[in-house]
Amino acid sequence: MTFQDRILIYYGSTKSIFSNATLLQHYIYSGTDSKGVYNYHWDEDWTNNQHHVTYGAEIDNTIDNRDSDNVSEQRNYFGSDKYTHPTNNNAASAYGNFASKCIPYVANIGNSNSDNIHELRVNIPVVNLTDGCGTYNAPYVIKTPKQLYTAADLIKTSSFSDTTFQINLPSSISDNLHWCNPATGDTPEHKAFQLNSENTPQFVNGNTKFTREAVRKYLAGAYFLIDDDLILANDFPGLGAGTTGDYAFRGVIVGKNNGTESTPDYPTITLTNGVPFVYNSNGCVIKNLDFVKETIAIGTQSDKAQFQYDSGCLAYGGIINKIMSGDNIIDHVGITYNSTVTSICAFKRRIRT
């Protein structure tokens, strides 16, 4: 059965009521407050051949959502290792023809992220944080950009709802606990938690439950070890991009030395959008890392404004955007700008103290 045959049988036509896109002509936003997501599961497409899935050209032909090998991250059904395919319910390889067979979900995605015109995130997998538990002696080990994106997204997003996501947490996640005690022998006393699907979701392991808000606050103060070079996604929100001080980042980020003591080799983190690595800080540590900044988002401050966690006066920092309080340490860190900066901001009124 060809793609056109299947469309004709299940939809009754090979034509679309849309000319350019199935959803939007443009999806426009700036900053970190918006994100468009479309997830579909294998059973929505294939259980009883119900085919309640809309295909789009971006499944193959994505600009924003490619991995380090320049391959689309959107080719699988959400939460599955099965490839999206119009005629095979158990495809062993990617279909590869959506770009030529389908119109896109969003017609115009701009020339770059700086245009503020974006794609949807389609079936982007959420990876687990199950190597370490965020404490001093057992930091979360970050080996892929998706892991750091997930941590930043969870800190920022009060409505985080992925019930397949797993995160290691120690026996207590109170603000003053920074050590994971051994349970038996050398096995740390931490366990994998998952979000339940109750009206007020909680992270659960057996009889132990932590509220979503408590886990977000814990992550904002956790320890992370960067194990490898990372190229962060275009919509990486920045660590601590919450609306209040509870979620400002106050943790520790350290790069692993993959060289020797005399000739160290620390990881490089490439920031592909205009958002700094840490969006809000209440006393964080960033150590032994190199940064590459591809794009700089600079606005114009036309009037006086308060310095706030969310919105307020404009600010820009390559590594930390806003330092709201606390002792902030940047040690053995370098940054390379691949964009030309001519001015930071323009003011109509003079700032007075």
Image: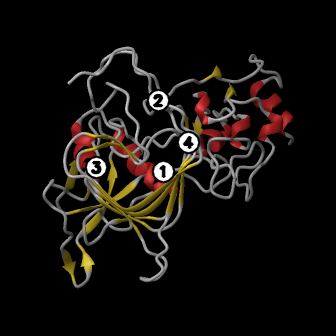
Asked if marks 3 and 4 touch (Cβ < 8 Å), the reply is no
Name the disc covering residue 234, or none: 4
Q: In the rendered structure, which disc, 1 or 4, sits on the residue that comes first in sequence?
A: 1
Q: In the rendered structure, which disc, 1 or 3, sits on the residue that comes first in sequence?
A: 1
SS class, disc 2: loop
Asked if marks 3 and 2 touch (Cβ < 8 Å), the reply is no
Asked if marks 1 and 4 touch (Cβ < 8 Å), the reply is no
The residue at 28%/65% (across/down) is: 191
Q: Distance between the Cα atoms at labels 3 and 2?
A: 20 Å
Which residue position is annotated with label 3? 220
Q: Which amino acid, by three-letter code, is at mark 1?
A: Val
Judging depth in this view, the residue of 353 and 292 nearest the camera is: 353
Q: Taking the image as drawn, is residue 211 in sight?
A: no
Which residue position is annotated with label 1? 126
- Pointer 3 local density, CA inside 10 Å: few below 14, some 14–19, many at least 20: many
Judging depth in this view, the residue of 319 and 39 nearest the camera is: 319
Q: In the rendered structure, which disc, 1 or 2, sits on the residue that comes first in sequence?
A: 2
Q: Which amino acid, by three-letter code, is at mark 3?
A: Ala
Report which quarter residue 135 is drawn in. Answer: bottom left
Q: Position of residue 305 (x, y in %)?
A: 29, 20
Query: In which quadrant is the C terminus drawn?
Result: top left
Query: In which quadrant is the N terminus drawn?
Result: top right
